[in-house]
Each structure stands twice: as structure tokens, then as C-alpha cells.
Image: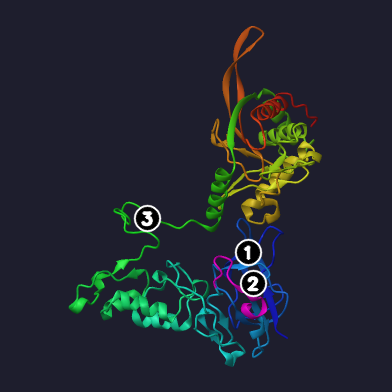
Amino acid sequence: MAQVVIMPKQGQSVESCIVSEFKKKVGDSVKVGDVLFGYETDKATFEEESQVEGTVLAIFYKDGDEIPCLSNVMVIGEPGESFAEFAPSAANGDAGKGAAGGTEPSETHATLGTVRGGTVSAANGGVERSETVSEGSSPSAAAIPGAPASPRARKLADEKGVNLDAVAGSGPGGRIIERDVLAAAAAQGRLSGLAKAKMAEGGLIPGEGSGLAGTVKAGDLKVWKPNHTDIPGEGTEFETVKMSNMRKLIAKSMYNSLQNTAQLTHMLGADARKLQALRKKAKKALEEGKVDANITINDFVCFAVIKALQKFPEVNSHCLGDAMRIFKTVNLGCAVDTERGLMVPCVKNSENLSISELSKALKKLADDCKKGSINPDLLASEAASFTVSNLGGFGVEWFTPIINVPQSAILGVGTMTLRPKMEDGKVEFVPYLGLSLTYDHRAIDGGQATRFLKAVATEIENLEIDL
């Protein structure tokens, strides 16, 4: 009996995943444990392994597609078995539509061949879909690079020399259909044979025709640039590249934070001599085998922040606009720099951990982020009650961190710098740690924020930890 493979749901906060690569194709034999495809959430990567043996009968998506969780992705069974009932439109209704904009599954693959555009041959157990547009659909306002296209539209585009990336689809969810290609072909005019051949290679669109009766020749073709006009110097002085999916998510989150909160930053220095002494003591304890964790300056700072948050529960909170979510536990978020971008995993119930346990927990989260195996639920902005972002390792002294909404505040930690300090009637230079607290003024008053920041500094300056 044919078995359907669905897109797993990795955590409660994940609604869709992006297929990075299908490891199997239609017709391939599959054994239990074989990797079928790789996929990623906004910040973590996974591999889906087969739970059954058989042959890949159908694949309903292509590499790079964003697929709603629990949607049907592929079918495994015996050659000749029917799989029509598993097609996303049949099995999942609207759940089978692409998460970004409601497009139909593109590049559908079927037994005994590959059929593009979501149409599966009835002879192979599939269902023939009509090219007609549903009533009430309207042409798209602009072309969407990589938009799905029907088989007839693709064939006609090849014949007419039309670049599908530059065509606005008028089908359901922006799908490119035959009439869209005909309109584009009419608009671009006649093409010479060489121009058609070059257009078929992709990336080009017709310019003004210089041939007989306005025919577009190969020399008239232009490089197609999506969503912007020609800019002087492009291609020689600079190039335009698309943001990664993760970069887009980070950009959206940061913009949303600044647009919807009243952010203000206070800065204060903390005497770091006690931190330096504790760090030296921790290194010695590790060498002597007294502790099994390499406790860093950042670990000590986070430990001090946790102690301060327990004294200021209003800061350990989420601002919900007209309400506050005050946490009874400290779910500490810690910013981690990775090759894919900034991630902020959190340590749940961090107030219950010793300094060694906290150090190991923070290191594990950072490693999981860099490997791409972090639990998505720990990355959700709602998971943490407060965040620490440390740029001290990069030599940054002060900065204005952006709140990870709906959290009410975030602490930026800078590098240590020598500053003069009066002690016993003498002035000497001592190391100070830069602390930058950004808070949502809707939830926290300036006086309260200042007292909390001072409490963090006091905890740092007076940490007493038995290693």
C-alpha cells in the first residue's frame, strides 16, 4: 500500500519549512532510514528519513519550495500504485498550497516521468488538472521570480522565447498560465532565431527591436533584472543579490520591533575586576578537574543578570500592548552569531542552574545553533523572557541592541576598557564592562530601568561563586 510522507512539524512555533534538497527522485528505490530530503525552518536544518521501503511514486514539490507543516510531500509504494489521493490539493485542501502567497505546488513529479506545474497524468494514477482560471481570479500586479507555471505555459514559453521569470501570473495564487505567456509574447514582438535560442537559455528579455519590421535580434536582448530598473554601474561596479530566507526573517523582525515599540537605551559601566578574578579562578579549577565546564566572562555576566532579574520581575516580562506577561521563571535568551545569521536561543528556568550548569547549557545552545540542529521552539521570541547580547569579543564598547519582541528589554554587553576610578584618595585605572540596556518605555519607566541596570552592575561587581 502506498505511504505518504508529510512535512514534519518541528516545534509548536513552526508553521512551514523550506525543502533544501530532495535526496531521492521519482523511481528511486528507498530503504528504511534512507534520507528522503533535507529541510529547514527559519534557523535550523533537518533531514527526513524514510520509515518504509518501496519506490518513490511521486514528489509534489521541488527544491527550494516552502511547504506548510503536515502537508503531503511525496509518496512511496510499489510501482503502478495509485497516488492521486495523496496530491496536496486532494489530501490537504488549502494546506497543500505554498505558504508564501498561496501558490500551487510547483514542479510536481510523477511515476514514469516528470510533469511540471502540478499536473499528473491520469495514466499514471494521477489527476489531470485544468488550465482554466477560477472565477474571480485576476492578473498579478507584478512578476514573481520562480512562480509556478502550467505545463502548457512552459511549453509555449519555450516556443515563443518568453522568460517566465519576467511574466506576471494570472492563475490561482499567481500561477503562470497559457494566456499570460501569450500576452508576454505579444508585448515583446517578433524574435529572430538566434534571439529565441539565447532567450531559451534564460536570464534575458527583449529590448527594442532593431531588425526588419521591428524584429528583436540577439544584440537587442537585455539582462533581466527583477523588481528594479537599470541602475548605472550595475554589473561592473556592484551587483544586486537576493536576501536569504533567514536574512529576510531577521530584517522583518528587527523592523517590526522598532516600528511597534517605544525603545530607549541606558548605558552604564560595571567594575570588572571581580569578573576577571573569577575567570582566572574558573580556568584554574578546570585545569585541576574541580569543574567540568569552561566558564567564561559571558557566563558570569549571564549569571549576574539572572540574579538581578529575580529582583526586578517587571523587567523579566513581555509587553503585550495593553497587558504585561510577568514571568515567575527566568528564561534567558542569549544571542549567537552563526554563518546563517543571528540566532537567539533561550535557557529555560535558568535561575535553577549553577554557574557550571548555566555555562554548559549556553555552550550547547550555541553549538546547536551553529550546527543547525537547535530546537525551533527555543528560538521563538516568545520563548525567552529577557535577552543578553554580548559583542565584547568584537571590541564593541557600547551599542543599542534591538528588543526581541514581545520581550520588554534586552541587555547589550560590551568589551572591557580601562577607566579612572577614585579609591582611598587615589585615582587608578580599572577595567570596566560596558552595559547597554534597551527597554520598551511602554512597559518600563526610566527610573525602573536605571535601577535594574544598576542592579546588574552591582551583581557583577559583587559576585561570590564557590567553584
Mark number for residue 95?
A: 2
Q: CA distance from mark 3 to mark 1?
A: 31 Å
Mark 1 or mark 2: whose residue is earlier in sequence: 1
* Residue at image point 36% right, 83% down: 159
Amino acid at circle 2: Ala
Residue 292 seen from this side: no
Q: Any magenta on residue 150?
A: no
Indicate the quadrant where residue 428 lies: top right
From the viewer's perspective, is 430 left or right of 466?
left
The local secondary structure at tag 2 comes to helix
Q: Which residue is mark 3?
A: 239
Q: CA distance from mark 1 to mark 2?
A: 10 Å
Label tally: 3
From the viewer's perspective, is 345 left or right of 111?
right
Mark number for residue 48?
A: none
Q: Quadrant of the N terminus?
A: bottom right
Mark 2 or mark 3: whose residue is earlier in sequence: 2
Indicate the quadrant where residue 77 lies: bottom right
* Residue at image point 61% right, 68% down: 67
Magenta segment: 88-103
Q: Are marks 2 and 3 in contact (CB under 8 Å)?
A: no
Q: CA distance from mark 2 to mark 3?
A: 37 Å
